[in-house]
Amino acid sequence: MANDSLSSILDSSRGTRDELIPILQKTQQKHGFISTQAVKSVARKLKISENEVYGVATFYAQFRFNPPGKHHIRICMGTACHVKGGEQLMATIDRKYGIGPGETTEDGLFDLERVACLGCCALAPVIKVDDTVYGHMNVLKLQQILGEYERSSEKTD
């Protein structure tokens, strides 16, 4: 994360505690995530503990502490998706890529998010990769779809 852009965000702040969430939002918008260094700098600027910054940031699902992947996988865990196998899809990604919700693969290709509902209950279980929704998912279909993203990425590297 470029320190100069974080500095510009912090320099535009009055340094008051009520600016914590807006500062975190601007930082994540600019860099895609909240780094350990950003937490330290924000805590110093607002004269609060790093634990307090983490406490607030982890309370809200919008904040992430890992760089985003090239492709963003969302797995729906709404009632219909959960009942029809959403947890199996999540477990498959954990086994295959070694990531859980809020994490990014080591190669930076995928990040994973568990979402409450994608609004496609008739297609359950559902995943969304970037802006594309895939319905009636099962483990085999999930592996095939993500394999296509892997192969596509290899061609562009």
Image: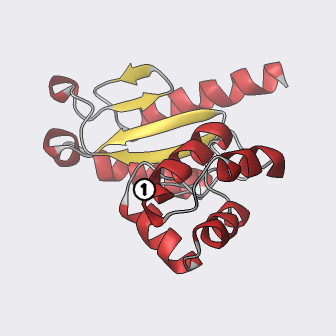
Horizontal arrangement in the rendering, residue 104 relative to residue 24 (left or right): right
Residue at x 58%, y 61% (from the top left corner): 15
Helix, strand or loop at disc 1?
helix
- Percent across and percent down for residue 58 are 43, 64
- Residue under pointer 1: 91
28 on left or right of 118: right
Percent across and percent down for residue 10 are 67, 53
Q: In this view, does 34 lie to the left or right of 2?
A: left
Look at 26% across and 46% down and name the residue there. 77
Residue type of the residue flagged with mark 1? Ala
> Residue pushed farthest front?
14
Above or below residue 39? Residue 104 is above
Tell me what residue is drawn at x 72 percent, y 50 percent.
6
Q: Position of residue 146 (x, y in %)?
A: 56, 32
Q: Pick the residue in front: 80 or 41.
A: 41
Task: Please identify the quarter of the rendering in which residue 98 is found.
Answer: bottom right
What is the x, y in percent for residue 47?
A: 59, 75
Specify whether residue 16 is in view: yes
Q: In which quarter of the image is residue 32?
A: top right
Counting labels gives 1
Residue 107 in sight: no
- Residue 114's place in the image compared with 95, above or below, is above
Viewer-proximal residue, 10 or 51? 10
Q: What's the coloring here?
A: secondary structure
Q: Quick one: 70 or 123, which is closer to the camera?
A: 70
Tell whether 110 sits left or right of 8. Answer: left
